[in-house]
Structure formats: structure tokens, C-alpha cells
Image (cartoon, rainbow, N blue to C red):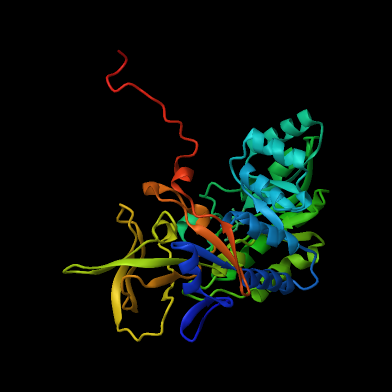
Amino acid sequence: MNYFEYRNRVLHAEDVPVSEIAARFGTPVYIYSARTLRRHFRVMREAFGGADLLICYAMKALSNLSILQLFAKMGSGFDIVSGGELMRCLKAGADPKTIVFSGVGKTDDEITAALKTGILMINVESRPELHRIAEIAARLKLRAPVSLRVNPDLDPHTHPHISTGHRTSKFGVPLSEIFDYYADARTLSSLEVIGLSTHIGSQITELEPFTEATGKIAGIVEGLRADGLALRYLDMGGGLGIPYQEESPPPSEYAAALLKRLGGLGLKLIIEPGRMMVGNAGILVTRVLYIKDTDVKRFVVIDGAMNDLLRPVLYEAYHEIRPVDARASRPSVTADIVGPVCESGDFFAQAREIPEPHPGDLLAVMSAGAYGFVMASNYNSRPRAAELLVDGRQVHLIRHRETFEDLVRGEPLVDVPADGNA
Ligand SMILES: *Cc1c(COP(=O)(O)O)cnc(C)c1O
């Protein structure tokens, strides 16, 4: 469910025609819907009913400050994966006691910043990291709240690049060693061992992997309890898919699947949804530059490219592509929709059936809110796109389109002689 809909056959972002926005702010441009973001957050929270729940929005999916501020105001916590994300969500008004820190490669500086900030907990992914956190906490003369992230060794049936719950992945503590890790952690006096975490993958479109994970997780909680360790937090990560093309389970079914086995454990439940919160709350709007016909194919060349949206080539991801103005009736054609970047991987769709686009037309790449702008780069010295947040009739510019000055900021022009060291 989202608020990008046709009215009189013109695509609207909430109450604003997308063509109007493109005329005013240029293309390519990311447009997010505030109403959709609010709705997704509410639906997820309500799905868990009266359960003791903290939603920690996985901000790597979309980390614009204004979006983070909206989440903070709705009462969301944050799942962060770097020191940069910590600074971002604090700047946006996050309550430190709602921040959890995940990731396999936290640096000393990042751990120090997290501990000084007083975040809720650090999700630990390896033994050396566990000991490093203990050392840093001891030096800072405080106790570090930690949770161990277990790798439950299962197959979430998703793209290999976004599958994290199998034992061959770099993430989490091996299931076979988890009790050992807890025993080790309990001997370190500068640690406060308060939680158990997991995160099995992303764009998961079946309930079964989540159900399998809850069984393994509940078993660990019960085993630890028998060992005299009472945890306070159970962090089940994110991963719920969205309907790019095939259906995904609704939040109500996801919540029921988690609560069935975990609801009675008496722990505060944390979830870290990213994609589900923001995926179809955003679109990327681009303009058609050229139609290029060869003897084997038709290419629709647009002004958006892989530097703006990497998902199609990175994950073989499918994004629906719609004409912004669908008033004229056009025959259906099959085409590759490609950008200007000098890479054959620079495409948004291949062999796609679409109402015949003409130069100058606007196309909307749907469900581009998650892992879209955040992966944008300056490859080919292309300025990154603007980001807009639409709320009803209002259009807020939440990130300026980059300029040439932005592209070369931080690059001193160092004068090295052309003829070697004379
Ligand atoms: C990426 C990530 C998430 C969010 O995953 P989604 O599929 O976007 O819900 C949650 N937790 C951790 C630890 C992550 O790395």
C-alpha cells in the first residue's frame, strides 16, 4: 500500500502531480511519501498488538535526515551499522536508548562513540569484537550493554548478496558456539550481557525462514535461562520483503509468526525493519533522452543511471517502471531501459514491456525508497540526485541536487610536474 497513484491518468505523489515536481526540481529525482512512511510504521506497530516491542528502523535502507527525524517523532528506534549512521540519527533527534549497533567490522572509534553516547546495545558478531568492546568499556570506566548476534544457519531463500543467516555468511556468531560466547561474555566484568540478536537476510517473501529462526532463538533463550542468565532483549532483525513483483507476507502474519514462539518468553522484542518501512514509500523519476533502435533491440535511454539506483545490476532486482503521464494511448513495446553510464550493467530493466516511451517522457521507477539513494555514487562524475519528501500537497526539498562544486569538494588540486622529479 502506498500513495503513488494515477489521478486522471497522471501519476501523483500523494496530492501532487509527479510531472509538476519534475518540472520544478529536475530529473533524476527521488520522491518519498510521508503518508506512506507513517502508514508503514503504524501498520508494523499495530501488527504486534500489545506486545512489548521496540521498532529499530534499519536506517541503512534510507538515511536522509528528514526521514530519520520523521521516524524518531513516530517513536521509532534505529538499527545502525556505522559511526556515520550513529551521528546521523542523533542529529535527527534519536533517543540513544533506542539505538542498536550491528555489523561485523566496528572500529575502536565507532565502539567508543557508541558507548559514550549510551546506546541501548551493541550486537556483537565475533569473539575478537566481544573482547575489544570489553577493553574499550573498561578504559572508559563503564559497562557496555551487549547482545550476541547468532547466525541461526538457515536458508532464507533470497538473493545470495542479501542472505545473512546461513553459516557460510560472514554475519553472526556460529550457532554451535553461541553458549560458549555467552559463557565468555559473562566473565568480562565491563560487559552487561542483556540480549540475543539475529538477522537472517533481506527481501524474504516467505514466513517459513522467520518461523525456523524463532524456534532456534527460543531454544537459545531457554538454554541460557537454565544456565542462570536472564536476558532482557530479543532482537529478531529485519528482512521482511515487499512486493516488487511477487507478493510478500503482510506485517500481521509476520508479527504472528514471531510472537507465536517468542511472545511468551517475557523479553522485550526488537525488530529492525528497513525495506518494509521505506521501500514502496519512494520512487525515482527519470526522463527519456533517446530511443535507440538497433537490428536486435530497442533501448530507451534515460537520464537516471546505475549511480542513482544500483539494485537492478547489483541484485538482479526487478523494479516496476511506469509512465508518469499515461493519458496518450501508446502501443506496448519491449525495450531495455538504460542509463548514460559507461557500463553494460547500467540498466533499470531488460526486455521490459512498456507503453512506447518518447523522448522527453517521464518514467517512474517504483519501490525505489529502500537501498536506492543510499547506494548512489558519483561514478562517471554524475552529481547525485535531489531527494524530496511529499506530504499531502506540500513538497519539501530534503536533499539538494549535487553541483559540480560538490563533486570536487575535498579534492585539493595538487600540482605535480609533468616531467618527473627534475
Ligand atoms: C540490513 C539490516 C536490516 C534491515 O533489513 P531489511 O531487509 O531492510 O528489513 C536489519 N538488521 C540488520 C542487522 C541489517 O544488517
Q: Does residue 91 appear to the left or right of 402 in the view shown? A: right
Identify whether 18 is placed above or below 191. below
Point out residue 312 in the picture as x, y percentages from the top left corner.
41, 61
Identify whether 78 is placed above or below 405. below
Residue most extreme to the top: 422
Point out residue 92 in the picture as x, y percentages from the top left corner.
70, 53
Task: Classify the position of the C terminus by image quarter.
Answer: top left
Residue occupying the point 54% across, 60% down: 387
* Of residues 22 and 259, the one drawn nearer to the viewer in this rendering: 22
Tell me if I can see residue 13 in this picture.
yes
Q: Does residue 54 appear to the left or right of 6 in the view shown? A: right
Ligand 1 in which quarter? bottom right
Residue most extreme to the left: 295
Identify whether 390 is placed above or below 268. below
Point out residue 184 in the picture as x, y percentages from the top left corner.
73, 38
Tell me if I can see residue 157 in this picture.
no
Q: Does residue 390 appear to the left or right of 146 in the view shown? A: left
* Of residues 211 and 162, the one drawn nearer to the viewer in this rendering: 162
Point out residue 419 in the picture as x, y percentages from the top left corner.
27, 19
Count the numbered circles shown.
0
Task: Classify the position of the N terminus by image quarter.
Answer: bottom right
Residue occupying the point 45% across, 49% down: 377
Q: Quadrant of residue 270?
A: bottom right
